[in-house]
Amino acid sequence: MEFNVSLRKAIKTGKVVLGQHETERCVMDGEASMVVVAKNCPEAYRDSLTSESEVFVYTFDGSSVQLGKACGKPHMVSALAVVNPGESDIISLKRT
């Protein structure tokens, strides 16, 4: 699976929420299927997500600038929540 391709497909065909605050809200509401955080996302934020819920957190092997580019956005994205993967296979990361 090519992560960037799967992420773009999830953004186009499903529902993906960008940003730390919106991601945290989705996790607290139980809407997030999985969360992706950039490698340089604050560790305290990452720990708070895993301690407060059972959601799968995948660490993107790149900075928030690179994650933003992977999302097709011209800005930094340090965290995102996949609510509905649409036609993407991004949820298969849970099994690895």
Image (cartoon, rainbow, N blue to C red):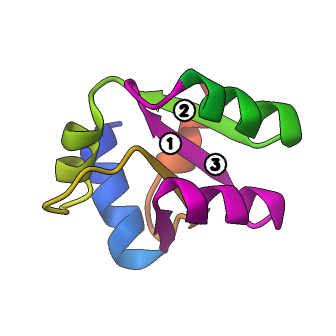
Can residue 61 be seen at all in this image of the molecule?
A: yes
Q: Secondary structure at mark 2?
A: strand
- Which residue bears the numbered disc 2? 58
The 10 Å Cα crowd at callout 1, few under 14, some 14 to 19, many 20 or more, is many
* Residue closer to the observer: 71 or 79: 79
- Which residue bears the numbered disc 1? 36
Q: Is residue 34 above or below residue 22?
A: above
Q: Could you give the CA–CA distance between mark 2 and mark 1, rounded to whole angstroms?
A: 5 Å
Identified by mark 2, the residue type is: Tyr
Callout 3 touching callout 2 (CB < 8 Å): yes
Query: In screen coordinates, is 24 left or right of 65?
Result: right
Instruction: Residue 88 in the image: state x and y as whole percent.
Output: 44, 60
> On the rendered image, what quadrant is the C terminus found in?
top right
- Which residue bears the numbered disc 3? 34
Q: Could you give the CA–CA distance between mark 3 and mark 2, rounded to whole angstroms?
A: 8 Å
Identified by mark 3, the residue type is: Met
Q: Is residue 73 above or below residue 40?
A: below
Residue range in magenta is 15-42
Instruction: Residue 25 in the image: state x and y as whole percent.
Output: 70, 64
Q: Which quadrant would residue 51 be assigned to in this image?
A: top right
Residue drawn at x 82%, y 67% as measured from the top left: 29
Query: In screen coordinates, is 36 left or right of 66?
Result: right
* Residue closer to the observer: 6 or 51: 51
Q: Residue furthest left?
A: 74
Residue 82 in magenta? no
Residue drawn at x 50%, y 67% as measured from the top left: 17
Q: Which quadrant would residue 31 be assigned to in this image?
A: bottom right
Q: Secondary structure at mark 3?
A: strand
